[in-house]
Amino acid sequence: MTQSTEDSNMQKINVDTDSSGLPKHLLTPQEVAKYFKVSKGTIDRWTRLKKYGLPGMKIGRKVLYQPASIQRWLNEKEQQLN
């Protein structure tokens, strides 16, 4: 599945997505922020603070996210409410 999105320069970007709508490649903090409709600072905080526990990985100086890990994290958060 391919989804078309626009970046801040209003250019269309085609991104391969899975059935949940998340991209199949590793995500940047900006992409995760766009998915959740929050700021990059919020994503940084959710990753850094254990009470949120957003799963990310540090590769060099970059923090990246696996779409499958984000989906598991969301499922865990949903179950905590029940």
Image (cartoon, rainbow, N blue to C red):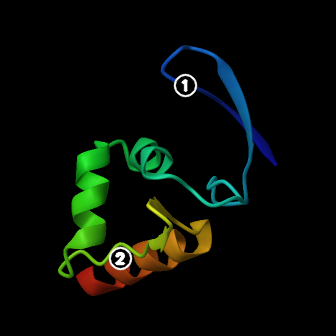
- In the rendered view, tell whether residue 27 sits above or below residue 48: above
State the residue in front, 60 or 77. Answer: 60
Q: Residue at x 62, y 56 (%)?
A: 22
Q: Can residue 82 be seen?
A: no
Q: Earlier in the sequence, mark 2 or mark 1?
A: 1
**In x, y percent, where is residue 11?**
64, 16
Label 1 environment density (alpha carbons within 10 Å; few <14, some 14–19, many ≥20): few
The residue where tag 2 is placed is 78
Q: Residue at x 62, y 61 (%)?
A: 26
Q: State how far apart marks 2 and 1 are (Cα).
A: 29 Å
The extreme right residue here reads 1
**In x, y percent, where is residue 55?**
42, 76
The extreme top residue here reads 10
Amino acid on which the number 1 mark rests in the picture:
Asp
Q: Residue at x 21, y 61 (%)?
A: 45
The secondary structure type at the circle numbered 2 is helix
The secondary structure type at the circle numbered 1 is loop
- In the rendered view, tell whether residue 57 sits above or below residue 39: below
The tag on residue 51 is: none
Amino acid on which the number 2 mark rests in the picture:
Glu
Q: Residue at x 60, y 73 (%)?
A: 68
State the residue in front, 74 or 52. Answer: 52
Please state, as top left, top right, bottom left or bottom right, where the C terminus lies in the image.
bottom left
**In x, y percent, where is residue 81?**
25, 80
- In the rendered view, tell whether residue 15 sits above or below residue 61: above
Which of the 4 quarters of the picture holds residue 12? top right
The residue where tag 1 is placed is 7
Q: Can residue 41 be seen?
A: yes
**In x, y percent, where is residue 6?**
59, 24
Closer mark to the observer between disc 2 and disc 1: 1
Label 2 environment density (alpha carbons within 10 Å; few <14, some 14–19, many ≥20): few
